[in-house]
Amino acid sequence: MLRVLQVRDGAGQLQVVAWDGQGDARVVRGVSSTYELATQAIAEGQTLQQRIDAAGLGDTVNLRKAAAEGQLGLPVTHPDPAHFIVAGTGLTHLGSADGRDKMHKAAQSAEKPTDSMRMFLMGVEGGKPKPGEVGVQPEWFYKGNGAQLRATGEDLVSPAFALDGGEEPELAAIYLIGPDGTPFRLGFCLANEFSDHVTEKGNYLWLAHSKLRHASLGAELLVGDLPDHVEGTSRVRRGDRVIFEKPFLSGEANMSHTIANLEHHNFKYELFRQPGDLHVHFFGTATLSFSEGIKTEAGDVFEISAAPFKLTLVNRLAVADDKPLAIKKL
């Protein structure tokens, strides 16, 4: 399968790289970003593969060496990060309600299902509609814009006021809005939808606050359809020790919603169909170290891997300095 990456050269400039996951990765000629490549493909009525074939390939790139040297960038970036919308959906995976339900049980009677469980069951019952029909809408959240995104090898920085900084191993899809407002899915990538689970546990209405954090994307943009069944591993390292390791499942066979249904309920809003905007949409997970009693610390390293992706997503947890907030009158 075609993979598109952005890799820095020796001078620190981003190059667009095409790779089939097997042989040599090679620089795509004539473009300086995945955004430019995708914009050209839309304008020419081509697929990304067709646009790459037309542009031609140049020098080979050693991706393992680039990863070791911290040269792998985000798979796509926008010239103006404010036009890169970061959002996602939760309670979308079979089993994903268990951890969330435990977190929120204390907030209400154990005899009454939590809102999380009710939302999950709605997805199980109506998240996979027949072709041409619209299914039930999922839980939805906003994480920020492109300024929040981090590449593999970069730190995920938790705010000084945060109560927790925990990983969420997921798959995400990236979209570019065409000139007429049509969303074009560019492909899929590994993702860490980093969140503050202690804040969320305090009150479900604080979910929106808990999601306004950094997030990371794997280097590979996997072009084409996602396999129905994806198996991965989420790992947390502290120094020389692995303090958490657990498999996670994704792909539609392991989800209570179809990807098409999740896409519909995001892009049904005209606000999210502004020409030239990029979007990354996180599809949710059922695996959290927080649900297993892990309390992360600054310096912990998150590792997320899953076939068919070849490169591991690696990020270190850091905590921002506490700086006073000054609000002034004009």
Image (tube, rainbow, N blue to C red):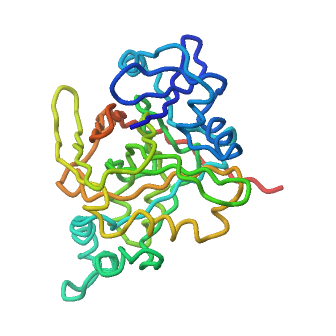
Question: In front: 81, or 279?
Answer: 279
**104 or 258, nearer to the observer:** 258
Quarter of the N terminus within the rendering: top left
- Residue at far bottom of view: 111
Q: In which quarter of the image is residue 15?
A: top right
Where residue 199 appears, as percent x and y from the top left, is 38, 61
What residue is drawn where x is 46% and y is 26%? 72
Q: Would you place residue 254 above or below residue 24 in this image?
A: below
Q: Residue at x 59, y 50 (%)?
A: 145
Horizontal and vertical percent position of residue 309: 33, 37
* Residue in the image at 52% along x and 29% along y: 6
Q: Quadrant of residue 112?
A: bottom left
In this view, 233 is above or below 238: below
Residue extending farthest to the top is 10
Q: Residue 242: which quarter of the image?
A: top left
Measured as percent of width and height from the top left, residue 238 is found at 22, 33
Residue toward you, 180 or 328: 180
Q: Residue at x 45, y 65 (%)?
A: 260
Q: Nearer the viewer, residue 75 or 116?
A: 75
Q: In this view, does 169 lie to the left or right of 330?
A: left
In the rendered image, the quadrant that contains the C terminus is bottom right
* Residue 36: x %, y % from top left: 66, 36
